[in-house]
Image: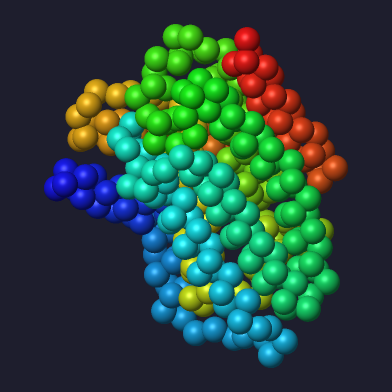
Amino acid sequence: MLPSLVVAAIHLALTLVLPPLLVGIIARTKAALAGRQGAPVWQPYRDIAKLLRKGSVISTTTSWIFLASPVVGIAAAIVASLLLPMGGHRAPVSFAGDLVLFAYLFGLARFFTVSAALDTGSAFEGMGGAREVTFSCLAEPALLLGLVVLVRATSSLSLSTMLGPQVLAQWHVAAAALVLVVISLFVVVLAENCRIPFDDPNTHLELTMIHEVMVLDHGGPALGMILYGAALKLFVLGAIVVAIAVPVRTGSLVVDLGVFVGAMLGLSVLVGVIESATARLKLRQVPSLLVGACLLAGFAVALSAR
């Protein structure tokens, strides 16, 4: 029982501590490629801590949904992380069909985020909510189709088995399908986390914002929780890509978790490189890229069904 508790404690600690570091590495990578020194990789921790110490100004038109949205976003991401195995070791919470709960936890968080944007009574934030929902309708099928490939490969409906030690063996059997899944899910990671080329989390151009426009009225602790929840979401979705792309399973908890953390940091560097090398897409071009991700995942399903 003790080893399981230790693994669960390390799992939760990584989930709570590591996400802001990923955001800091992305920003530092972009600064380095642009020839700037940039902020230290610990800056997101400082920003979140500073916001949590500030006060809040809340509109009188809002209801409890406005303040519940950041809390639900963090809670949904933490629960989703408990369903994912890290470093090939079994997740703290595992049961048949947990992949469905995993997908819809993020749907729940999105529902509250959009509802909070509408709760302000701002047509501008409503526009951002409409964009968010529209693009998520194309991103979620790609995620689910990618998971279907893993279900087919492992004959399991549990994420602990789908992303566990069997993944390494599947690379020898269905490498082409897994490559398509990794590419598709990586596109989903960029889209769901509002990264370039889909969105820019640092932009304040009113007509081009998607996610940022929905949280313009949040400030102080609420904004700090939103930033932390966004980092958690990047960590959780990125963990799926890492579990498939880097299926190192030595049986040693220290080595496997070390490889996992290193791969997550490498994923952050890759995101930073992509954001430095590409420009943001026009809004009418975003659906085309998401449809492409769905098609790649669909082709992977077809290959795995042979």
Percent across and percent down for residue 43 are 41, 58
Image position of 218 (left or right of 260): right
**Looking at the image, which is closer to me, 291 or 50?**
291
Residue 205's image quarter? bottom right
Q: Residue at x 40, y 70 (%)?
A: 49
| Extreme-left residue of the structure | 2
**Looking at the image, which is closer to me, 216 or 119?**
119
**Looking at the image, which is closer to me, 71 or 191?**
71
The answer to whether one can see residue 158 in this image is yes
Q: Residue at x 67, y 17 (%)?
A: 302
Image position of 217 (left or right of 227): right
Q: Residue at x 83, y 71 (%)?
A: 123
Task: Give the colour scheme shown.
Answer: rainbow
Image position of 258 (left or right of 199): left
**Looking at the image, which is closer to me, 120 or 213?**
120
Percent across and percent down for residue 111 are 66, 62
Residue 77, compared with residue 302, is above or below; it is below
The answer to whether one can see residue 182 in this image is no
Percent across and percent down for residue 175 are 52, 13
Residue 113's image quarter? bottom right
Q: Residue at x 54, y 84 (%)?
A: 56
Image position of 93 (left or right of 140): left
Number of disc labels? 0
Q: Quadrant of the C terminus?
A: top right
Residue 5, compared with residue 53, is above or below; it is above
